[in-house]
Image (cartoon, rainbow, N blue to C red):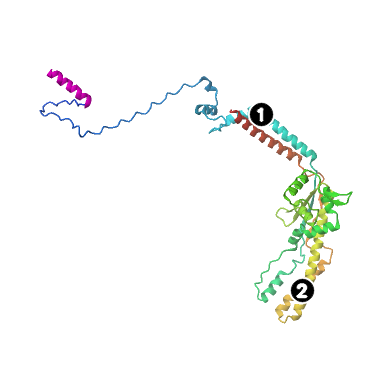
Amino acid sequence: MGQESGVSTRMTTAKTEPQLDLVRPEGRAEPIAAPEASSPEPVAQVRPLPPRPAEAEPPRPEARHETPVRARETARGADPLALPDVVSLRDVVLRLVRGWWIILLTAAAAAALAFLYLRGAPVEYTATLILSSVEDSGGASVPTTQAVGTLTTLLGGTGQSESVSDYTRFRYLMLSRDVARRLMDRSDIDKVVFAKEWDEANQRWMPAPGWRTAVRRWIGETFGIPWYAEPSVDRVAGYLERRLKISNVEATPMVKVEFSHRDPTFARTLLDDIYHETDRLMREHDRISTEDSIAYLNDALSRATIVEHRLALQQLLLRNLAKLMLLDTDQPFAARMLELPYASPLPTAPNALLVLILASIGGVVLGIVMVLCVDALRGR
């Protein structure tokens, strides 16, 4: 009984408190004391082991025939409309080859539209005028830079003067409102330039028919904006500024003036009229300024007492007198025509070959974009 009670007591203790089975080392008589229950040692926490990596699935039989882009999309379960990270050139070429008929149709459609445009586009001829500067033309409105500099120095100035040559002024005045007004007074340039707006039966101006006029009318009436103005000096000057092409001939001071119009005769005549009207305008302006300068120099010369001042004034007076004599001649004043204006024998616009080539290239590019978009939408 005593043994059984000892066993049961030991089993009960084993259920409540864990006992450490310690082995007594040989050669020692002292027993190893068990740790006290009042100060238990902290038990180390056991971290769970990481999960085992999943075994790779064997490749599917149909994966052998997939493209690299399709294989990556299938492996990651990506959206078929999403663009891949890397697109191989071979895959792009295969997509374009599958959609060759789309590219061909867009190129043919673009070429057909270009053909229709060429059938209705107005044919224009280009007239050309070559100008050069007149040598020893009398200088600017205040002549003899040396005399002016000497007189300015004597009067206590810096002796530096800036002037614009007559040739530069001639080039600027060709596109001025004054020349446009002269052209309107001497010819019916406005009725030729804006022929679509002239009603010959009623002898009045009216908006040109067409969809552009309808759009401008709708915008103007909707927002309360003036949308039409009859041809005037400002409109003619703006037309000349847009259509006249003035450029230097290579690296020379010569100037090439070009103008394109449906009527080659009108284009050639307009360049001739612009040249002569600009020359007359400059003569009139310079004659008035030169006569005023002569009157002033005569008065200043009569009151000058210093010899150096009188010499400078005399040089200016002689130069202005020479310029006034030049203004009364029929010789070119600021610019000279190297040859009469001439027009091209064949139309220069539109360039049929260039239009067809550009339209075909644009159609091919549009077809390529359409093929890639359709292929992306289909999830290929």
Q: Nearer the viewer, residue 99 or 334?
A: 99
**Rendered image: mark on residue 217:** none
* Residue under the point 80% across and 61% down: 279
Residue at the outermost bottom position: 305
Kindly indicate whether the residue at mark 2 contacts the one at mark 1 (C-beta within 8 angstroms). Answer: no
> Which amino acid type is marked by label 2?
Leu
Magenta part of the chain: 1-17
Is 209 situated above or below 273?
above
* Residue under the point 82% across and 69% down: 325
User: Would residue 31 be seen by someone viewing this image from the given angle?
Assistant: yes
Is 317 positioned to the left or the right of 68 in the image?
Answer: right
Counting labels gives 2
Overall secondary structure of the magenta section: helix
Q: Position of residue 249 (x, y in %)?
A: 73, 53
Q: CA distance from mark 1 to mark 2?
A: 82 Å
Residue 16 in magenta stretch: yes
Q: Position of residue 220 (x, y in %)?
A: 74, 49
Quadrant where the N terminus lies?
A: top left
| Quadrant position of residue 251 | bottom right
Residue to which mark 2 is pinned: 317
Is 287 situated above or below 342?
below
Q: Position of residue 306 (x, y in %)?
A: 71, 81
Residue to which mark 1 is pinned: 100
> Which amino acid type is marked by label 1?
Trp
Secondary element under disc 2, as helix, strand or loop, is helix
Q: Earlier in the sequence, mark 1 or mark 2?
A: 1
Q: Nearer the viewer, residue 145 or 53?
A: 53
Is 1 situated above or below 275?
above
Q: Position of residue 18 (x, y in %)?
A: 22, 26
